[in-house]
Image (cartoon, rainbow, N blue to C red):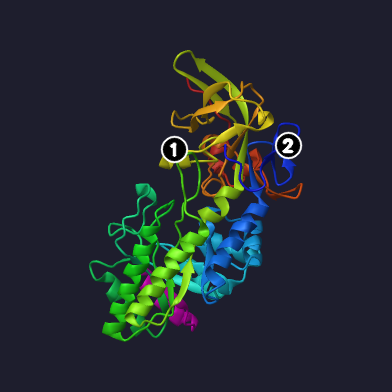
Amino acid sequence: MRLQGTMRINAAGHLEIGGCDTVDLARDFGTPLYVIDEALLRSNCREYYDAFTKENSNDLVIYAGKAFLVGAMSRIVAEEGLGLDVVSGGELSIALSSGFPAEKIFLHGNNKSPAEMLYALKSGVGRIVIDNYFDLETLEKLASQEGVRPAVLLRIAPGIEAHTHSFITTGQTDSKFGFTLANGDALNAVKIALASNDIVLKGLHCHIGSQIFELDAFRHTAQVMMKFLKEIRDELGWTAEELDLGGGLGVYYSDGDNPPSIKDYAVAIQSSVDDCCQKWGYPRPSLIVEPGRSIISPAGTTLYTIGGIKDIPGIRKYVAVDGGMTDNPRVALYQAKYEGLIANKADMSAQEVVSVTGRCCESGDMLIWDLAVPKVEPGDLLAISCTGAYNYSMSSNYNGLPRPAVVLVKDGSADLIVERETYEDLRRRHRIPPRLLGTCRQKG
């Protein structure tokens, strides 16, 4: 497993993160356990902030909260000077309750409810990103009723085919997201927005997908969007103040992944926009990006306790852990690949190859295929790296499994930022109708 951030192997031969021995973390907080490396998290935020705002102070980096959003995360993002992208009333509530400044929040979503839009309006969020005609009509009515004129962006589907998993490709023409550029819907939406007395159109937004390694895809997207802005100006006389190009920069998960640096990503986008502005005499809009995975994913590690071991001679050795697809569904959803190591034997050489399976009653509940490890025994501690994004946020209670706790580690201290769910938590919202509370009778 590649050691990232503050990870190291300590004198005891154990994996250490943020100055904390992972064996101690597992003992104190239990497993499965999400561990967030605060120093690496903040470093990634600062790298983005510097790359985009040092030369262009009007540019803005907005953290995509869907990757991982809890109160402590909101506070860190705010402290590092980033904005925040939320996609539901629930995420907006988490952000606001943590004290995140509403004016730096962008509300996204392809099917925002009227209640969520009203919540955003009353909260004074900085931008509402309009995804479709229903969004547009609903927001206009609500804004008129409330007597406010919210600043908005229109989400555009630019027709870019990003080379990534089909489930996380979002910018192509055949997409549920945004106004389609190719068929004229995007231009029509711009006309409607500009004619409205209830909203203020600030610019355009797009997002072509996630876990992208090819900078050319980002360059091409910037050029397509700038060309569309030029066409709008030529036809309608409107000049955009803002251009939001979304996120999507990939990260290292396992051998073979070779993501560009944050700096190279920034240069690729900025230079493409600048070139287009110079070529067409277009005033440079404020550039907005929305990274999520590339900020939080490398900073997250999941710890598991190994239980049952099944050896099928000549075929495979299965090693089961106390978590699985309930705390990391990405393997089942996207065939994602991860690296791991035996955290309490981190200094030992590999002696066998095993496949790590989760504890859910599903054959597809696998976490890692063919992992080289020291001799494994029940009770060993497995660490899987790069699990900060889309693990906790997509976790579930399938099979009645409580969600894991989350700890934030830094300089030898560990702070609990999400409590482990209990069986009582699983039952808390269940209700049994009075008619079912009588004495149960057995048939037969």
Residue 357 percent location from the top left of the image: 51, 29
At x 23%, y 67%, the residue is 183
Residue 323 visible in image: no
Residue labelled with disc 1: 332
Left or right of 424, for residue 310: left
Q: Which mark is residue 10?
A: 2
Residue 279 appears in view: yes
Q: Which residues are magenta?
A: 134-153
Q: Residue at 35% x, 74% y: name it.
A: 276
Q: Amino acid at mark 2?
A: Asn
Quadrant (top left, top right, bottom left, bottom right) of the N terminus? top right
The answer to whether residue 151 is magenta is yes
Q: Residue 209: image x %, image y %?
A: 40, 55
**In the image, which is nearer the foreground, mark 2 or mark 1?**
2
Q: Earlier in the sequence, mark 2 or mark 1?
A: 2
Q: Nearer the viewer, residue 274 or 108?
A: 274
- Residue 103 in picture, x, y percent from top left: 57, 74
Q: Residue at x 58, y 31 (%)?
A: 439
**Residue extending furthest toward the left:** 183
Residue 101 vertical position relative to residue 207 in the rendered view, above or below: below
Give residue 144's quadrant in the image: bottom left
Mark 2–mark 1 distance (CA, rounded to whole Å): 33 Å
Residue 167 picture location, percent across and down: 37, 48
**Which is the main secondary structure of the residues drawn in magenta?**
helix
Between 50 and 135, the residue placed more toward the observer is 50
Q: Is residue 57 magenta?
A: no
Please give left or right for residue 136 compared with residue 147 in the image.
left
Describe the element under mark 1 as helix, strand or loop. Answer: helix
Q: Amino acid at mark 1?
A: Ala
Residue 139, by quadrant, is bottom left
| Neighbourhood count class around disc 2 (C-alpha, 10 Å): few under 14, some 14–19, many 20 upward | some
